[in-house]
Image (tube, rainbow, N blue to C red):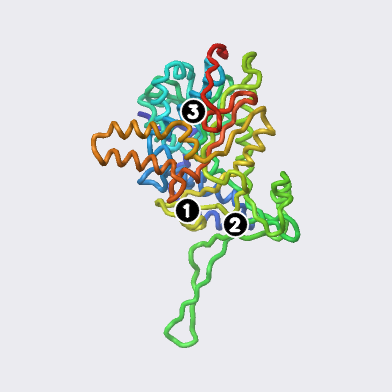
Amino acid sequence: MRGLASLGKHSSSPPSSTQPKRKLGDVLADIVKTTGPISVAAYMRQCLTNPESGYYINKDPFGTEGDFITSPEISQMFGELVAIWCITEWTAQRRPQRIRLIELGPGRGTLMRDMLKAFQSFAPFKNTIVDICLVEASPTLRTTQHSTLCDSAATETEDGFSSVTRHGIPIKWYINLKEVPTDVTSFIIAHEFFDALPIHQFEHTQNGWREIMVDYSVRQVKTALSLPGQTRSFDEDPKFHLTVLPYYTPSSKIGPESSPRYKNLPVKSKIEISPESWDVAKELALRISEQRTPKAPTGSGAALVIDYGPAETIPVDTLRAIKGHHFVSPFEEPGTADLSADVDFTALKMVAEQEGNVAVHGAVEQGDWLHALGIGARATVLASQQTTPEGKDRIAKEYHRLVERSGGAMGKIYKVMAFTPRGTPTPVGFGGGVVDQSNDDVE
């Protein structure tokens, strides 16, 4: 099988070189020393996707042997219920006859694998899937996704890579969502995608909004020698830290002034803003709005966003790093830890409703959403199929980790939001029930 990471210009692989690779911290330190402090967004972008040393470019961070574990890696139930949600929404929208599944940041492909397995029991839905499009920047993860989902080799095309899943569905990889065609109805999944998009941080000072930037310094350490009165100093590794600029930046003139949510905050307030997240939310809304037919005049398709962050408030000081399943400083050894920040769900909702003819549902807590989709019943069935006490206990632990609201579980921390065409029924999981409008199919 030909690895995706070797497929030429679309792989984002670093060029081969006999020169030893510099540490990303040293590269960033040189940038700061030359041009001054850089934005948190620029720092995150380099740490995560630098072509040579970016965290996502060169490693698989998922699972027990990686740095963190996600809901699909915990239990098959998660992917199964996401699949059920897609089917219920497809049914509520009069069963479009040609649909495209799109996943943003598909990880190891585990979520899509479990969804495709679940779809096999729903032939009317499965038979409408014309293809699957995965939006993934990491060549390492693209290779892993291909191994998870496909048996056939991958081939290179002008705009990406393509293959066929084990279930016979064409699949294609893209670097950017805007490259994915818009010719058919799209059902889009973004699970733990927005939290990795770069953020800008700002503080409201007496002189107006100022941007919080990443600066660099070398800490001088004095060590006493045996002779009285004599000391020596030496440089340690580069030290990065946050600093508030005393002057405006272009971002500080635009970002905090973009909404009354920010402009009316008192002095000393801090906020985080992710313009890249806004752009993606806009793109999702437009894709749904623009897929119109005579029987779907307000658009068709849906987007499901599952991530962590506050349902209503503005994120503040949430930049974090995870390495080896433990929190570490975001500024130690850049490029070796996963960086993320809370998702501002209210901002996503405002952008989507402003830019597209969509209704936004949620954000609701993941535990509530999973229960509405029937995770309790599904866990009971899976537990009954286990032949050992250990197997039954495993299912119980998986269930509780996905839905519980305390003790490090995901039920409260993670939120779920959906975009659907304005005027269509409220989706399951957000207060709506199963609606079947199959008597009037969409073409």
Q: Residue at x 46, y 88 (%)?
A: 228
Q: Is residue 303 visible?
A: yes
The x, y position of residue 235, in whole percent, is 50, 68
Residue reaching furthest to the left: 388
Give, as a three-letter code, the residue at label 3.
Trp
Give, as a three-letter code, the residue at label 2.
Val
Q: Which residue is mark 3?
A: 85
Disc 2 crowd rating (10 Å Cα; few below 14, some 14-19, many 20+) is many
Instruction: Tell me the SS state at disc 3.
Output: helix
Q: Are marks 1 and 3 in contact (CB under 8 Å)?
A: no
For the residue pair 16 and 422, the one nearer the viewer reads as 422
Give, as a three-letter code, the residue at label 1.
Arg
For the residue pair 396 and 254, the one nearer the viewer reads as 396
Q: Which residue is mark 1?
A: 22
The x, y position of residue 226, in whole percent, is 42, 84
Q: Which residue is mark 2?
A: 214
Instruction: Tell me the SS state at disc 1.
Output: loop
